[in-house]
Image (spheres, grey):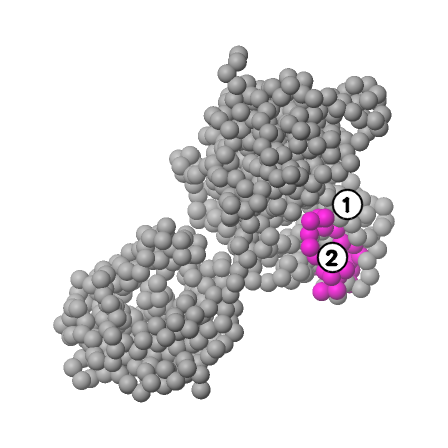
Amino acid sequence: MRIGDPLPEWHVEATPTFVISTALATRDFQDVHHDRDLAVRRGSKDIFINILTTTGLVQRYVTDWAGPEALVRQINVRLGAPCFAYDTLKFFGQVVERQEQDLTIEVVGRTAHGDHVTGTVRIEVPA
Amino acid sequence: MNAAIAGIGATDFSKNSGRSELQLAAEAARAALTDAGLEPSDVDGLVTFTMDTNAEVAVARELGIPELTFFSRVHYGGGAACATVQQAAMAVETGMAEVVVCYRAFNERSGHRFGQVQTAAAANIDNSWSYPMGLGTPAAMVAMFARRYMHEYGATSEDFGRVAVVDRKHAATNPDAWFHGRPITLDDHQASRWIAEPLRLLDCCQESDGAVALVVTSAERARDLPNKPAVISAAAQGSGRDQFTMTSYYRDDLTGLPEMGVVARGLWRRSGIGPSDVDVAVLYDHFTPFVLVQLEELGFCGKGEAKDFVASGALELDGALPLNPHGGQLGEAYLHGMNGIAEAVRQVRGTAVNQVADVEHVLVTAGTGVPTSGLVLGQG
Amino acid sequence: MTDIEKEAARIAEQGESAPRLARDPVNLPMINNWLEAIGDKHPGYTEVAPPAMVQVWTMPGLHGRRAPDDPLGQMMAILDEAGYTSVVATNSDQTYHRYLKVGEHLSMATSLEDVTGPKRTGLGEGWFVTTRSTWYVGDEPVAEMRFRVLKYRPAQKPEPVAETPEAQPIRPSVNRDTEYFWEGCRQNELRIQRCGGCGLLRHPPGPMCPECGATKPKYLVSDGLGVVYSYVVHHHPAVPGKRTPFVIALVELDEGVRMLGELDGEPAIGQRVEVVFTKVDDELTMPSWRPRADR
């Protein structure tokens, strides 16, 4: 795990089931995450993924790569285009900083509409 | 003909490219030149669609092409696709240019969408007989033909759906396809909502952002370049009697595409091959019914028999006539037919992701319902 | 200092809101639901919770409300009143001081950190509102979050014509070659071009007869009767001036030419129809079809 190492590309199919089950599992009951009719009425093209889920996916992307021994210390995300139902969310990542056992990984999650999330994750890996 | 496609290039196919149409055109053209092993300074000709918003001079400026001796455009929307290559080939054969790049670039999904009703199009006198009456989308215009075709030959919505299923099956294994990994079943097709009865959502191709470019040069020069040339065995344009753009409803018969018949006759005569010699068919598939009609006009089956031909499994990769191995416009992307020409080149080279074995001749067609064009590409 | 900035300063001075206690302690069923939904196969979450779940514990829930002293809620209300009615989250920065053990009961308190604006953004003019939340176990801070939203006044977007059924119908363009037809419609006559040289009937019309080359087109007035040759039931997208679904029929008139028009009725190929004229305004009358009982 060195600076510049890329993370393998990872694709998440944001099916309606995925959008809704993650919204409920994160206790986010806003209608735009589970009710398509209301989401459309509010000007959205469909239901979309909530922020807590985005954060969870960013964490999963990094820990899937780093392994279960890695400890997550910080997740900073900047939010862009919504990830709608039926979108494919493609994750890309790269190690951008390493100080001894502390690594910083830059992560981008992108749909066809543009960047859904850009962020950094700080983890601590075993020596 | 003594010309060949020596290079192909494309951008990613998306729903929102995030860049200008000019950037897309320049990226695809540069990729095509790199593929051909040529430099922008080798280019002296450019061809595109009348509908393309990128002026030849603008593309030349972005690429740093110093001088152009040939620039040309072809009308009638997607009907122009194969004709751009025809223009390029004629320029090469007559010595008007040595290396011609054909390109098509648009933000057709995130920008100007053809699938919506274009109120401004009614300014055209021909369109004043359809748009004000409520017939204002390509899907609806094709649906008018499709309904009559069903009535005359007993074809059903499922017969149209089989075309979509084949395209999406092929797209499912093409990583560049928008619908990569997303095949559909005939039940999915039948469950999809009506767009313009008898057309369902899954009878209609997607809308896309992206660009494709092709490099045409003489067959001799192409043989010295890094990739195996796709030799242009024949190119043809066609317009039929009493032709309209999308609304040729006033002919005796509404079940054919006589303009494609004109193209077919030209292709078979010039290439010296016939339908039975075609190893792969890349047929324009913006709407499924016209794939059936094309099969008939091109002579792969008799009038009204396309539904049985399709149901026989002929269009599968191991069938009698593998159709759109890249997934077509229903599956890969809607690039006004230009991505189909790129696929035909890959099939001739033997480098396609869904490669058909022992390909000698590939047939490509351009937009249907409009004056159109076609190509036969083959081994050098 | 603007009023919004004054209000922001006042709310910021209140400092941290009263801590809000999570509904449940950190627990395995909710952890497992979360892992299942996210698809995370990480084997380590049997005694501790995934860090990214921290906010889940203190979510207000299905019927939850913001506490009256919640600084974000207060600031949103002020910006709503000032006309910045839309909101979008832009940043969430979470720092986890340690992993949370099953059984620990969290509480969260929030303060207003920063309000800046008005800024021009792609969405419209708005204010960035930043809050800082701290999660506690007892008195121990265990995690923190800086959360930023853009509260904005949506930029005026032109209504997409195609999506507005009430929009004006599409009007034909009319020129010397076609004027006779639209003039006929105004007089409730369905006119078919007839060549002044050879008598060829033709629709759509044109200036030169393709049969004899004459350029003296005349017209006859059709009986307005015919049969449906083909038809479309249009569902999507919306068409200006029409309510979907609607039927457009290609009708073969008894005189032998075909013509498009909306059909008010159940469509079928072979259906006998007659013309109807609908006046749109003084300039335009549209022909359309309705079923006829005869035959």
Q: Residues within 10 Å of mark 2 (few under 14, many from 20)?
A: some
Q: Residues within 10 Å of mark 1 (few under 14, many from 20)?
A: many
Q: Which residues are magenta?
A: B37-62
Q: Is residue C179 left or right of residue B189?
A: right
Is residue C53 visible in the rendered structure shown here? Answer: yes
Number of callouts in the render? 2
Quadrant in the rendering for residue B371: top right
Query: Residue B55: which numbered mark, if any?
Result: 2
Say which label, 1 or 2, has the lower sequence index: 2
Q: In the image, is residue B281 part of the stretch drawn in magenta?
A: no
Is residue B299 visible in the rendered structure shown here? Answer: no
The residue at 40%/53% (across/down) is A41
Q: Chain of mark 1?
A: B
Q: Distance of mark 1 from mark 2, alpha carbons?
A: 17 Å
Q: Which quarter of the figure is the C terminus of chain B placed in?
A: top right
Q: Amino acid at mark 1?
A: Gln
Pick the front one: A53 or C8: C8
In the structure shown, which secondary structural element does the residue marked by tag 1 occupy? helix
Residue B237, x across and y down, in percent: 73, 37
On screen, B112 above or below B157? below
On screen, C67 above or below C281? below
Q: Amino acid at mark 2?
A: Ala
On screen, C187 above or below B17? above
Pick the front one: A101 or C236: C236
The residue at 73%/44% (across/down) is B75
What residue is shown with label 1?
A: B87
Residue B355, x across and y down, in percent: 55, 44
